[in-house]
Image: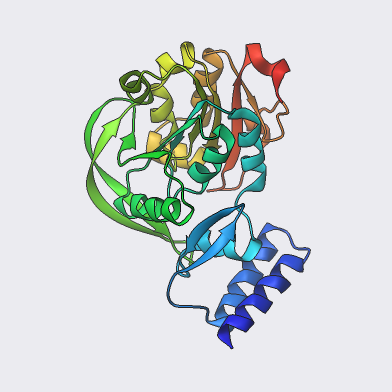
Amino acid sequence: MKQMMRRAGVAIFRWLPLGHEGRRRVRKALLAVMGGPRRPFVMDWRGFRVQIDPGQAIDMRLHFTGDYEPATLAAIKRLAYPGSTAIDVGANVGLVSLWLTRCVGPAGRVIAVEPSAWACERLADNAALSGVTMIETIRAAVADRPGEAVLDVINGYNLDNTRSRRTETVTCVTVDQLVAERGITNLSLLKVDTDGFEMDVFRGAQTVLSTIRPDIVFEYGPDHLRRYSRAEPEALIALLRGHGYAVLDEHMQPLDPADLRLKFGETANLVARPEERLASVG
């Protein structure tokens, strides 16, 4: 009976013509009424098989909507080309990493970097469920310098909008280091979602930005940047522009991030593309 109620609730939710906040409220109400399964279950998503944890907000959003950040995935599909290498910084449970395997194809390579042991385990589970073997998973934090750090690692985003955290000692690597150690020359895409540490990631990627010049899909959160990178959002955009990158929205249209008018704590996924390739967006 509960399974039938859950399926009916999901169908109703996907049908309702609601905005983001309205969908969040309806989803919360449906979860309260249905109760939902207490144990993880598996669902099909874009040809992959992924595990859904009923206690995780991202999982249940995927379950209810049937998809995960479709505009971002569409942008990634346009930029990560077959046979190339893509690096997923802040891979979480691996949804973007899985999608990247589809984009770069069997001749390509996907490197997923994630500091949370919990998330790395779930990423491995999702890859195994989907029969994907081409993701190289590295448990580390991507920073502006290599070494070790004691970090407040996020181990999940809960349904009540809180985050599960745990203090852990984590190895730190840089993008420049990852690329140099592996001899990567065909890096098509660098995806960065590190909950406010994006500035540190780009500071540790300046050789790659100057030489290989991959396209970038990154999370832009002014409040998170100020809190965790101790940097103004304008400084991050200036760093990218200083390397000859133009900032675009997910539809590949020019954008001034200052015009986004994000509310406190809100983020947006943006694209940074080398200026010399602006005319070649596929």
Of the 4 image quadrants, the one containing the N terminus is bottom right
Determine the residue positioned at 45% across, 16% down: 185
Residue nearest the observer in this picture, 36 or 152: 36
Determine the residue positioned at 42% across, 74% down: 39
Query: How far from the left and from the top, in percent, is residue 26?
Result: 66, 71
Residue nearest the observer in this picture, 73 or 232: 73
Q: How is the image coloured?
A: rainbow
Query: How far from the left and from the top, in percent, is residue 159?
Result: 49, 66
Of the 4 image quadrants, the one containing the C terminus is top right
Q: Is residue 93 left or right of residue 268?
A: left
Q: Is residue 264 left or right of residue 151?
A: right
Q: Is residue 257 left or right of residue 183?
A: right
Determine the residue positioned at 73% across, 28% down: 253
The number of discs equals 0
Query: How far from the left and from the top, in percent, is residue 180?
Result: 34, 18
Q: In the rendered view, tell whether residue 174 sits above or below residue 13.
A: above
Q: Quadrant of residue 162?
A: bottom left
Seen as rendered, the residue at the extreme bottom is: 1
